Amino acid sequence: MTKTVDFDAPLTEGDLDQLYREGKLPRAGMQHLLQLIAPRNLWGLWADKLSLVVGVILVLAGIVFFFAFNWREMPGWQKLGLINLGLVTCLVAALVRGLDSVAGQALAIGASLFVGVFMAVFGQIYQTGADAYQLFMMWAILILPWAILSKSLAHWTLWLVIAHIFMVAIWVQTVGDGFEIDVPLAIVGLLAFGVQSFHAQKHPKGWTAHKWFSWIWLFYSLTLTAFLVGAWIFKLRYGLNIYSDPFDGRLQDIAGLIGIVLHALGYYFAFRLFRNLVSAQIWTLISSILTSTIFLILFAEWIFDWGDGGLLFGGLFMAAVVAGIFWGGIKFLNLHEFVGIPAKENENA
């Protein structure tokens, strides 16, 4: 049974191939449309953008190493003056090139980095006594308008990284230790993934229509939720005592349960709401690793106690179980359909 091409949905390479085989599309037209859907020079465009990003990073690294090498010999006014010069230069150049260009966005990101450098150097010169979390808090607040105006996912990535460092720093410096901090971090990461994916779904040609951002933050968030669940299972099995935990472990059970809920929310986002294949693959991979880890936590000690051959047979048995878990993850993934991926047809129909 031949699949009918849905012209109300975005065409895929399979749709073009089917139209060509049915004689409804000439070869030249198929090749032209293929170039639009999956351009052959896509790697060149990525290489061009990557070269620009690497160039900006190297320039900023050179500035940092210049300060580090000449730190003691330079007076305070000179340090702050050069940093301000770099900040203003990046801002002016970004406005000249325009924030709708890759170069303009890279220069705006450079200006945001200079803001943090200026605040750190100012605090060291005048010994303001500010805590580290205050530095990152003010840094995030000051560059937030630039991130909004730039409409750049790379700029938002920088802002989110700074905001995460602020959250970790204020937790460590004002609260204490403990893995409960992973709960708000995972929530922020899932929120970034959800907001970007929702906006890209509503505006497929907008500035948020770049999947790398959602994949990075989904992977990050699910890694945190998997750690929360794994640490909670480990605590239930063996006990977990963190010396500087201000809550004496009272919130560990709650954090583990919230981790399960957030991990399930990640499944809903990847498989049900946005139905993105790569996002679903990320969830399946991390879930398979988590399931394997839970199995090892619960049964490794018992398996390796199988007499003299426990190490060999236990290792083989656990390898087989882990392989079975990953095989099951692949089968579970194949049960779902995703946007832009045509469903498999019944060849016997």
Image (cartoon, rainbow, N blue to C red):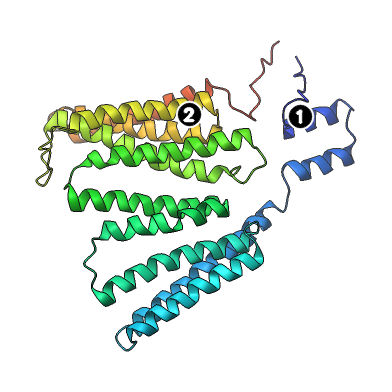
Residue holding disc 2: 269
Residue drawn where x is 65% and y is 68% of the image? 96
For the point 51% across and 45% down, which residue is it?
A: 213
Check disc 1: other Cα within 10 Å, few if <14, some if 14-19, many if 20+: some
Q: Residue at x 19, y 35 (%)?
A: 311
Labels 1 and 2: the sequence-earlier one: 1
Report if residue 227 is visible in the image: yes
User: 320 or 143, which is in the foreground?
Assistant: 143
**Residue 303 on image: x %, y %:** 19, 28
Q: Is residue 263 left or right of residue 208?
A: left
Which of 303 and 266 lies nearest the eye of the viewer? 266
Position of 221 with respect to 244 (left or right) is right
Badge 2, how many Cα within 10 Å: few under 14, some, many 20+?
A: many
Label 1: element kind = helix
Q: Residue at x 72, y 33 (%)?
A: 12
Q: Secondary structure at mark 2?
A: helix
Q: Quadrant of the N terminus?
A: top right
* Residues tagged 1 and 2 counted as in contact (Cβ below 8 A): no
Could you tell me the amino acid type at mark 2? Answer: Phe
Q: Relative to 233, does residue 114 appear above or below in the rendering?
A: below
Q: Looking at this view, is 148 or 157 the one in front?
A: 148
The C terminus lies in which quarter of the figure? top right
Q: Is residue 4 above or below residue 17?
A: above
In the rendered structure, which amino acid carries the disc numbered 1?
Asp
